Amino acid sequence: MISDKHDDFTPRITSFLCKWCSYTGADLAGTNRLQYPTSIIPIQVMCSSRVDPVFLIKAFLSGSDGVLMGGCHPGDCHYETGNYHTRRRFAILKEIFDSLGLESDRLKLSWISASEGPKFAQVSNEYTEQIRKMGKNPTRKSVFL
Amino acid sequence: MNSIVMKQDASTAIRELLAYLLSSSRVDAVLTMRQVPETGSCDLGLITDPSGMVEAEPFLPVMTANAGQALSSISMSGKRIAAVLKPCELRGFTERVKREQGSFDNLLTISSICGGVFPLEKVISGDLEKLVPRYIEKTARAEAPRGLRETCKACEEFVPMNADISVSVTEHGSLMHLHSDRAEEYTEGFEGERIEARADQSHIDRMMKSRSAAKGKLFQSLEKSSGLDGLVDLFGKCVGCHGCSRVCPICYCQHCDFESINFDYNQPYFQESLEARGALRLPPDTILFQLGRLTHMSFSCVGCGMCSDVCPVSIPVAGIFKKTGERTAGLFDYVPGRDSEEPIPVMVFKEEELGDIG
Amino acid sequence: MAAVLPVGSDLSGAMNRFLKTILEKDIVDAVLMPMKVPSGDSFAWIIMSDSSIVDDAEAMAPVMPVQGARALRSLTRKGEGSIRVLALMRPCEIRAAIELSKLGQVKTENLILAAYDCPGAVPMDSFVSDPSSGEDLFRKMLAGEDVSAGEVKPSCTSCVEFSMTDADLHFGHFGLGGTEVLLIPGSPKGMEILEALELPADRETSIWDEAVRKRREKQVASRDAAFEETGENIRGVQGMLNVFADCISCRNCRAACPICYCRLCHFESETAKQDPNSRLDSAVTRGGISLPADRMLFHTGRMTHMSLSCVSCGQCSDACPADIPVAQVFSFVADRTQKAFEYSAGRNDGDPLPLRSFMKSELSGIHEMVSDAEPGGHAHE
Ligand code: SF4
Ligand code: SF4
Ligand code: SF4
Ligand code: SF4
Ligand code: FES
């Protein structure tokens, strides 16, 4: 379809971040003036398990170059077990993408606690770089999706 | 295993068993395929009067609705029901029971080693009369009849997994295997020689061979449509009727999320999408529905093939769902419908699993 | 009176150019029209603001996979917006959109509804199984050549509203030998488009009028024959049972119908569910029942809910996996229910929906009407 594999574009990474951990981690990165890229478009959710995988698919099909799901570390979910469920659902989603030959690397799950500002910055920088290498999501231009 | 030798053909024997269960008041109703002799029309009958058994065709190779779905709510009536189910229907029912949409409490399930069913279009066009005799001949020899549903040709789960009674038809004759106490209890007094026997393994092995080969072929043909373009090739012509989910034994939601107001958009949404890509399909979210349904239920797909059969634009929905479903279920060593005690993978978790996914 | 659009080599192409022009000139913000899907065996509704994409689209598609009114519903149901869209559709799609606007499901304020002389559509299943024959067939239909009735959607062979609807703009091409298209404005909105393009509506239309009249005569005859046949087939309870004998309750007919807009159909809701115990009781009373249950209730119930707005588009038949002539039955019933109120679905003539209005004194002959429907019946007092 299109081959927008230039290195100079700013990817759009829709990021679902749980309020108690990852979102706070992102905040902390901000207040500590740690650089994290403008590619990250944060959406605050109460818990990673609030996110139906369909949200991630919607973001993917709507042209997000990457989709990031951030939650508390296993065992630390504020609702006890939410993120264990998230992990299973995410695994299922990745498997579906792989089985259909879709680029499952455009989906990422990451555990980032409230105190891990630097980790947030690092994950988002690395992921942005990875996505930049992959190029724009071809769903951006597909008319039939 | 305790088994009853059937003197006549399997259909007649089961018809007699069902009539016996009704007339001896062991059950209040019987669920079975029927065929109206005059018109050839087939349907699922819930029969309470033993005289209605003349129309019963328990092993008709036809699935007008997944009987697991049809049985769902009436199984919770508290009345005793004997249900003849194809293995995938029984598995579909089992998946529904896990979702609190049915109950085994008052149920006697009867299933059989399944030769597969014909697609609806063949049933509707009146080809059945010609097809069925050949079907019976071929399946008795463990050969694959022609013209079956694609997912039936490729079904490796043709031996019932948790039926009370299972029927096997082999060149050594027809047997009724009694798998549970309930089966023993209900068949007490029913005529027929009791022997110790299992289904003929070599028969099963031969069937499995052709099924596995067909499955390999089916999956391979689907592999050709890979990636985003492949996805659009597969589902681009979907008209969004959602017939596939309505006839699916697993999709039990009364109001499907994808038909809810959650997927209605306001004008700014359309405006932004148009600005971003210059064009947009209407109604939107056709392919989102397919991927979304896969995430919601693929691990429970029993490969019954209903979805393909009702698709007005002939999308091989069932093949896709079966293929992807085997992978999503495989992540958790889950086999849909194997055991009603086995929890649905998305309802449970292990603290240590799935490696370094996060 | 009409404006004239010259046709070069092909009709559809000329209409495409027209749509492209109005996009380029910013007369509308977007155009909604069919586009062939990449697999080549169907079409999808695409709304486009980028005029270059129009080149890949097709003004007139051989098939009607999704009733166009459904596309408009998804676009406008949540409220009016500011995007001005011209939608080019078949007459039955426009008529369904007008019905939906009366039902509050389509907002027409910013829509320009455009229709064309429709030669009928190819049934979906035959097109999917052999697209290139389907395209050939449609070319013949467009050119006015004789094709066998069995190849065309049954609803189309008995459609009498194949031309002028209450669209804002109509593309008339019947009887013009494929050399030109008449642009007939049907409303001030349509007129504005012509004005913006500086196309004067000064052509007299008698040749086209005559061609449409002739075709209508033929269509009326075949519709009457179809009604007669359907009337015979569905006579009495047994007739209905026979026609719907193979129904598997998939509800595709409802899902494909443009008029059935309910998100959760009553017949699929909790309200319509019989509790399992009384279901078994009714099985006991009759010695047995057919599952899934309540098929007749569904079909006759749907008739009462929507037949007054049925536009006879045939989508229900096309979507039925059991090959039941659903549309023929619904058209037949709709013809009678609409006549009872002198209502014609899809007309933008200010007539309110019959079920949303009443007159204090009306339907005095209701008893007679009921008796008419019963063969050999006597008038009830
Ligand atoms: S039945 Fe076919 S056309 Fe209808 S929603 Fe499913 S895949 Fe799409
Ligand atoms: S997805 Fe299709 S094949 Fe799988 S269980 Fe549902 S209807 Fe059967
Ligand atoms: S009932 Fe059938 S013919 Fe009538 S509007 Fe609905 S889909 Fe069209
Ligand atoms: S589409 Fe056909 S089979 Fe399905 S409910 Fe309607 S009439 Fe019955
Ligand atoms: S609260 Fe953070 S993942 Fe549940």
Image (cartoon, grey):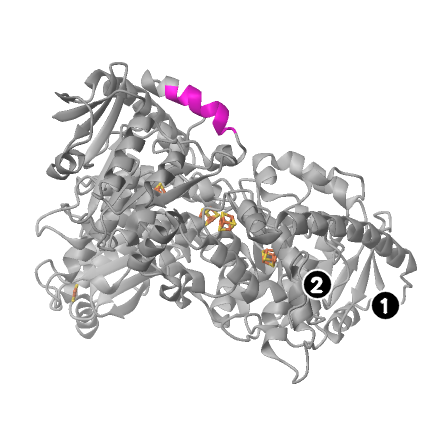
Left or right, residue C50 beside residue B120 = right
Task: Chain letter for mark 1, please.
Answer: C
Residue tagged by mark 1?
C201
Residue tagged by mark 2?
C114
| Mark 2 element type | strand
| Mark 1 element type | loop
Task: Chain letter for mark 2, please.
Answer: C
**Vertical relation: B56 (above or below) C238:** above
Left or right, residue C98 beside residue B34 = right
Alpha carbon distance from label 2 to label 1 = 16 Å
Q: Nearer the viewer, mark 2 or mark 1?
A: 2
Q: Which residues are magenta?
A: B127-136
Give the camera-side residue of B132 and C63. B132
Q: Percent position (x, y) of residue B295? A: 30, 51
Rendered image quadrant of residue C124: top right
Give the camera-side residue of B193 and B151. B193
At label 2, the amino acid type is Ala
